[in-house]
Image (spheres, rainbow, N blue to C red):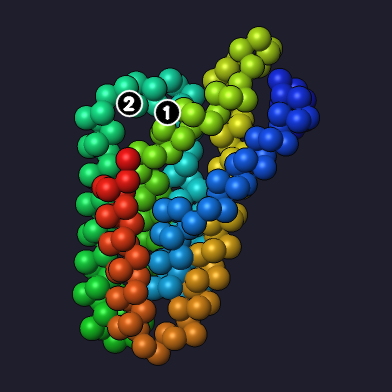
Amino acid sequence: MWDHIAFLTTDQFLTFLIGGLLVNLAPGQDIVFASACGIQGGPRAGVIAGFGVGVGVFWHILLAALGLSALVAAHPVALSAIRYAGAAYLLWIAVKSWRAGALAEGQGTPSLRRAFLRGILSNVLNPKPILFFLAFLPQFVNPAAALPVWQQIVLLGSIFAFNGMWITMVFGGAAGYAGKAIGHRMGIVNKLAAVLFAGLAARLVLTR
């Protein structure tokens, strides 16, 4: 592992690691999404949704490694299309969660497979990671190193994704236990999740 990141000095690696952890700990879309899934579906759903979100990050790592992130970022129309598609998807989940509020307990709760797939899509359809990786990862890339630049991006991106994954899974699981504590009032739980999903959709559209 250490041999592979020899293109970074110890100070650079620690800066990258701490900076990435601070970004992942910030209550952004990933954490809120996993928490909403946990509130609605329980601890396991929250953890699995967090895992799905982490897997979705690798899509953006692939785009960055192939140089496609810069291409997409250079075209505002493409970024807007991804943004609105993501917002529409989150809004669709919000509507389904709100309508599930009238159902009996245990019904309308997302399966683990669905929570996982929703987690992936919520990240894939979020254009913000594209811009983040373009701004963050190149600061720690060394073009003169023996390791090709695209491999450096994949390695650094994977470290960032792994740290973000377990942090998001912890938040999702914790929110799941909180939701489980009031699970007997499933209507309120589902509506709370719907509000969170709708809020994410609005944030994705309004935040540039």
User: Is residue 109 in view?
Assistant: no
Q: Where does the C terminus fall, quadrant-wise?
A: top left
**Marks 2 and 1, how far apart in space?**
9 Å
The amino acid sitting under disc 1 is Leu
| Place of residue 111 in the rendered image (x, y in percent of width and height, measured from the top left) | 38, 67
**Residue located at (58% from left, 62% from top):** 170
Nearer-the-camera pick, 19 or 100: 19
Q: Tag 1, which secondary structure?
A: helix
At horizontal 30% and vertical 83% (from top left) the residue drawn is: 187
Q: SS for tag 2?
A: helix
Q: How many marks?
A: 2
186 or 87, which is in the foreground?
A: 87
- For badge 2, the amino acid type reads Val
At 24% from the left and 36% from the top, the residue drawn is 80
Precedes in sequence: disc 2 or disc 1: 1
Mark 1, other Cα within 10 Å: few <14 / some 14–19 / many ≥20: some
Whether residue 170 is visible, yes or no, is yes
Look at mark 1 in the image and give the residue it sits on.
Answer: 63
Q: Circle 2 sits on which residue?
A: 72
Seen at 31% across and 79% down, the residue is: 107
Judge left or right: residue 129 versus residue 84: right
